[in-house]
Image (tube, rainbow, N blue to C red):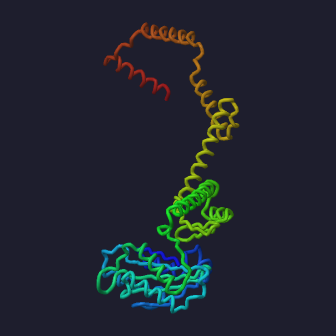
Amino acid sequence: MIGKITTGKSFRGCMSYLHEGRLQENEELQKLEMEKKQAEVIYYNQCFGNKKELIRQFVEVAQLNPNVSKPVFHASISFDLADNGKLSIQDKIDIAEGLAKEFDFADRQYVVITHADTKHEHLHIVANRIGLEGPTAGDSNSYRRMAEYCRRMEQAYNLTKVLSPNKFLKPEQRVAQSQRVDQRKELLKKHLAKAVTQFKSVKEVKSFMEQKGYQVELGRGIAFIDQQHVRFKGSQVGYSLADIEKKIRQEQTQRQEQQMQAKNQARDQRQAYGQEQPKSLADQLREVISENEQKEQKTYLKKEPETHYLRAALAAGGELFAGLLQNMPEEEPETPSKKKKKKLGENQSYHISR
C-alpha cells in the first residue's frame, strides 16, 4: 500500500483531473481519457453534486480564509496488485475516513474517488483544508504520517506490505534507487534534446518519443513514462511543454539564420570569382537609359564652329555705314517764306492737274 499527499491552489484543476483525466487536445481524445479513468465518487463529506457543483462548494468555503494560498489537500492511496479484489467499497471508504481523522479534516469538505485506469486499485481523497469553523488543517510531517498510516492499514486489512517510500529504505537501497532514477532521467533528457533539434512541432516530438518506447501524456503539460513504468514530468528534466515549444522555435530560427548566412557566402564567392548571376532586364534597361543620357549631354556641350571671319566682316560693314551717315548734309529748317512758296507750288500743281 502506497500513499502520497500533495497540497495545491486550484480545486478546479484537481477536480477536473480526477473526474475527466488529463486534458487532451480535442473532445474525442478527452472522451477516451474519461472512459479510461472510469472515475466514481464513492463518498461525500459535507458536500454533494457533480464536478462543477463540487468545485463551486469547495471554492466558496476556501474564500472564508483567503490568506491560505494552498487550500487543496489531495491524497492518493494505491494497493498492491496482489490485493486486487480484497477490499470492498465500504473498506475503501473506511480507510479514507481514517485518513481524514489522521490529518484533521474529518469535519471538513472532502470526497473519495476511485479510478480503474491502472492494474492497481487506487483511490483519491480531495479535501478542503479550510472549514466553516476551527483552524486550517495542517500538513506538517505528512510524509511520515502517511507512511505510518499505510503500515497500520496493511496490518488491519491484511494487505501486502509495500515499503516504497525511499525514506524507509536502507541507505544502500536509497542510493541504488536514486542512481537508477538519475540514469532514467539522463536517458530521457538525451532523447528529448535530440527530438527538439530534429522536429518542428510538439506532435512530431511526441511521435518520436513513443518510437523510443515512452508513453507520452500530453495535456496542459507533458509527462513521460518509460519502459519500467517510471513517470517523469517534463519539467523534472528541463523539458516542460513550454520549454519544448520554445526550444523548437529557437532551433527553427537558428536553422533559418544558417541558411541565410550560407546564401550570402555563396553570393560573395560568386562576386569574388566574377561569376555573378546575369543582370535582370530592369538593370539592363537602367544601364541603357544612363548611357543615352550621357550621350545627350556630350551633344549639348559640343563647341561652336569657327565663325570669327564672318563676325569681323559684319563689324567692318557696320563701321562703313556709320561713316556715310555722318557725311550726309543736314536738311535746312523751313522758314515762313519757304513754307509759303511750297504751298503756292502745291496749289499751282493742283490747278494744272484739273
Q: Position of residue 142 (x, y in %)?
A: 41, 74
Q: Nearer the viewer, residue 154 or 36?
A: 154
Whether residue 344 is situated above or below residue 218 in the rendered picture: above
Q: Position of residue 127 (x, y in %)?
A: 41, 82
Q: Is residue 275 visible?
A: yes
Q: Nearer the viewer, residue 70 or 207?
A: 70
Q: Residue at x 54, y 81 (%)?
A: 122
In the displayed structure, does residue 188 sit left or right of residue 339?
Answer: right
Whether residue 306 is situated above or below residue 1 in the rendered picture: above
Q: Nearer the viewer, residue 159 or 126?
A: 159
Whether residue 330 is situated above or below residue 10 in the rendered picture: above
Whether residue 100 is situated above or below residue 218 in the rendered picture: below
Q: Nearer the viewer, residue 1 or 78?
A: 1
Locate residue 193: give its quadrant.
bottom right
Locate residue 224: give its quadrant.
bottom right
Q: Position of residue 139 (x, y in %)?
A: 37, 75
Q: Is residue 7 visible?
A: no
In the displayed structure, does residue 297 sit left or right of residue 351?
Answer: right
Locate residue 83: give its quadrant.
bottom right
Q: Residue at x 32, y 16 (%)?
A: 335
